[in-house]
Image (cartoon, rainbow, N blue to C red):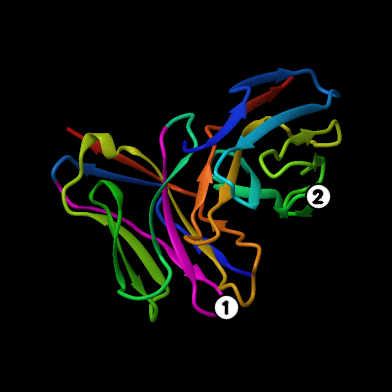
Amino acid sequence: AQSVAQPEDQVNVAEGNPLTVKCTYSVSGNPYLFWYVQYPNRGLQFLLKYITGDNLVKGSYGFEAEFNKSQTSFHLKKPSALVSDSALYFCAVRAPRTTDSWGKLQFGAGTQVVVTP
Amino acid sequence: DGGITQSPKYLFRKEGQNVTLSCEQNLNHDAMYWYRQDPGQGLRLIYYSQIVNDFQKGDIAEGYSVSREKKESFPLTVTSAQKNPTAFYLCASRNRETYEQYFGPGTRLTVT
């Protein structure tokens, strides 16, 4: 079974500084990895994904993430944070199609990002 | 929130009553999912469906039921057997080509 760990409940960063949200995973085989963002009382919005190919993935709103197979990590990064980036961020993993054709995602507990002016 | 609608946004029920949460999508996706979100626990999978008239239990299916009579619709019933029904419920559908899940805006259920 797959699992995801987001070790930080909250990340605080000043506007303009780099933002990093950590994620590590456990899955059999090559993982499919995702980042989602949630604003208060809203559904989740897709940010980016890694399926295969280049380990550095670029996504929406200036976010990027780096897949590191040896460290089983998929940290989310943004070079210069904005106050509007304040939200709840979720990392998710699914097993490859050969082991799970249902496309089930396992989500981390989420990391609250607070960007101060 | 894409092409997925959930209604109502807020729902209040008395303990012991069943309640049905609506989820409709116009994305032509085959797969649909129901999640429950509680503070500090992320999203937990309740039920999922890959095709009409077929669905599978997720990690926390006890006290819930679903149906999938139409491709567009995947309603969730929270029964009186669910011990702690107060939560935020999210519906999603999946794009088979891109693997991305698209989420609805959610329904916040409060049971007193």
> Is the C terminus of chain B in the top left, top right, bottom left or bottom right quadrant?
top right
Which residue is labeled 1 in the image? A28
Which residue is labeled 2 in the image? B53
Direction from residue A61 to residue B56 in the image, left or right: right
Q: Chain of mark 1?
A: A
Measured from the top left, where is residue A31 in percent x and y? 49, 72
Amino acid at dot 2:
Asn
Q: Residue at x 53, y 42 (%)?
A: B103
Label 2 vs label 1: CA separation?
30 Å
Amino acid at dot 1:
Ser
Q: Residue at x 48, y 32 (%)?
A: A42
Viewer-proximal residue, B64 or A14?
Answer: B64
Tell whether position B91 is magenta. no
Viewer-proximal residue, B82 or A104?
Answer: A104
Tell whether position A20 is magenta. yes
Q: Chain of mark 2?
A: B
